[in-house]
Amino acid sequence: MILDAALVVLAVAAVVATVRVVVGPTDADRVLAVDLGFVVLLAALAVLALRLGAPALLDLVLVGTLVGFLATVALARLAARGPG
């Protein structure tokens, strides 16, 4: 029951992140929204791992967090560099 409620909250957060990606208004807002969407996806996978009793999904979450961190650092460096 609580895990189902957590999945609903995460779904709402994913919708909010998607709206921010579409609306913008700046590229930094879009990058931040994509990062939020990725974190929400990983959190949903972790909740599903608990709900389904599938510990293999937690390995996927671990790898995803490492990839997400590296992508965030790369996008931050790209945004700091500026156009051109």
Image (cartoon, helix red, strand yellow):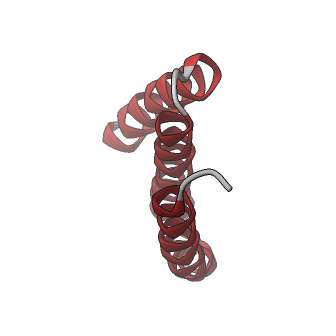
Which of the pair 2/36 is nearer the observer? 36
Residue 70 sits above or below residue 50 on the image: below
Q: How many marks?
A: 0
Which of the pair 7/71 is nearer the observer? 71
- Residue found at x 50% / y 65%: 72
Q: Position of residue 25 (x, y in %)?
A: 52, 21
Q: Find residue 27 and report its image quarter.
A: top right
Instruction: For the N terminus, give its image quadrant.
Output: top left
Residue 5 sits above or below residue 73 on the image: above
Instruction: For the C terminus, give its image quadrant.
Output: bottom right
Which of the pair 51/61 is nearer the observer? 61
Which of the pair 48/76 is nearer the observer? 76
Q: Residue furthest right?
A: 84
Q: Residue furthest left?
A: 2
Residue 16 sits above or below residue 28 on the image: above
- Residue found at x 48% / y 41%: 28
- Residue found at x 57% / y 60%: 52
Q: Residue furthest front?
A: 84
Q: Find residue 4 and report its image quarter.
A: top left
Q: Position of residue 70 (x, y in %)?
A: 54, 78
Q: Position of residue 22 (x, y in %)?
A: 64, 21
Q: Is residue 19 left or right of residue 1?
A: right
Q: Position of residue 40 (x, y in %)?
A: 48, 47
